[in-house]
Amino acid sequence: MSPTRSRGGNRRQAKTVFDEAMAAYKRWDVESAVEKLQDAVRLAPQNASYHMSLAQALARAGDFDQALRSLANYLRLAPDTAAVSRVEQLFASGMDPVEEVLTQKMKAAQIQLDMIGAAIQMWMEFRIALGEETLHIPKPETWAAALDYTVRKVNLHDTTLSKIAESYGTTEETVRKHHQRLVDMLDIMPCDYRYFTGEENPLDKLVEAAELLERLERQFHSET
């Protein structure tokens, strides 16, 4: 078999595996998505988009070191794409403008440091989850406000859109729009384990209740 034909076969196989990975990613089967994307990358290592998708899946799995390695490969293969400047910021040693505003405002509001850290983590995950999409930030305060509002909602803090918008010098409509984008992109839920900082997460009780109900159902239907 000629090298050209072999490469073509690998590309077709990689595309099939990639499509399977994306289907797994959408249904939150993260482990399967990561494994299939790693296979796609091995079959077509020069495809920059595969490296970006692998970074997204790894970030969703919480493996940020490996996600950044995949992003580095993406930058190497696609140095001129529109997403490059946003991706490069993830490797910066200092805070970006959104993080600077967010940290300043949340500290001024006497929000505990672990919640500020959760908001910064949310921002990092969001920028990775965007993949190759562009993100224009003419006013960092708008995204900082949305992150602050979202992490407070996750942690069941009593707050309102109007208070957050006023604090950051933006509008309720803008905060609401960016908040919804964060929720949709990261599939954020109340008390989300990724960003909840309290000692006892109310979701634990729901899990315990579900497990108890399952045991009771088994006992109820078992023959004695």
Image (cartoon, helix red, strand yellow):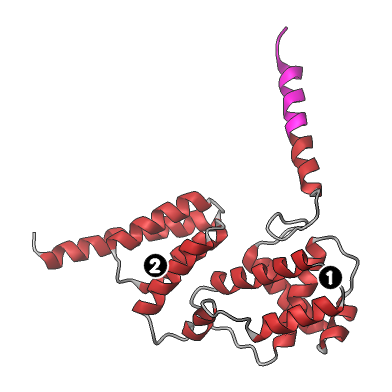
Quadrant hosting residue 164: bottom right
Q: Which amino acid is tagged 2? A: Tyr
Q: Residue at x 68, y 58 (%)?
A: 194
Q: Residue furthest front?
A: 93
Q: Which amino acid is tagged 1? A: Ile
Q: Residue at x 77, y 58 (%)?
A: 197
Check residue 111 in the rendering and tell me which mark sits there, or answer none. Answer: 1
Check residue 102 in the rendering and tell me which mark sits there, or answer none. Answer: none
Q: Nearer the viewer, residue 89 or 55?
A: 89
Q: Position of residue 220 (x, y in %)?
A: 76, 18
Neighbour tally class for label 2: few under 14, some 14-19, many 20 plus, Cα within 10 Å = many
Which residue, given by chain and number where applicable, does mark 2 sit on?
Answer: 50
Q: Position of residue 100 (x, y in %)?
A: 70, 83
Please report whichever mark, 2 or 1, sits nearer to the chain's N-terminal start. 2
Q: Residue at x 74, y 86 (%)?
A: 141
Please say if 35 is above or below 147: above
Neighbour tally class for label 1: few under 14, some 14-19, many 20 plus, Cα within 10 Å = some
Q: Residue at x 79, y 36 (%)?
A: 209
Q: Residue furthest left?
A: 1
Please say if 120 is above or below 191: below
- Point out the stretch of residues depicted in magenta: 211-224
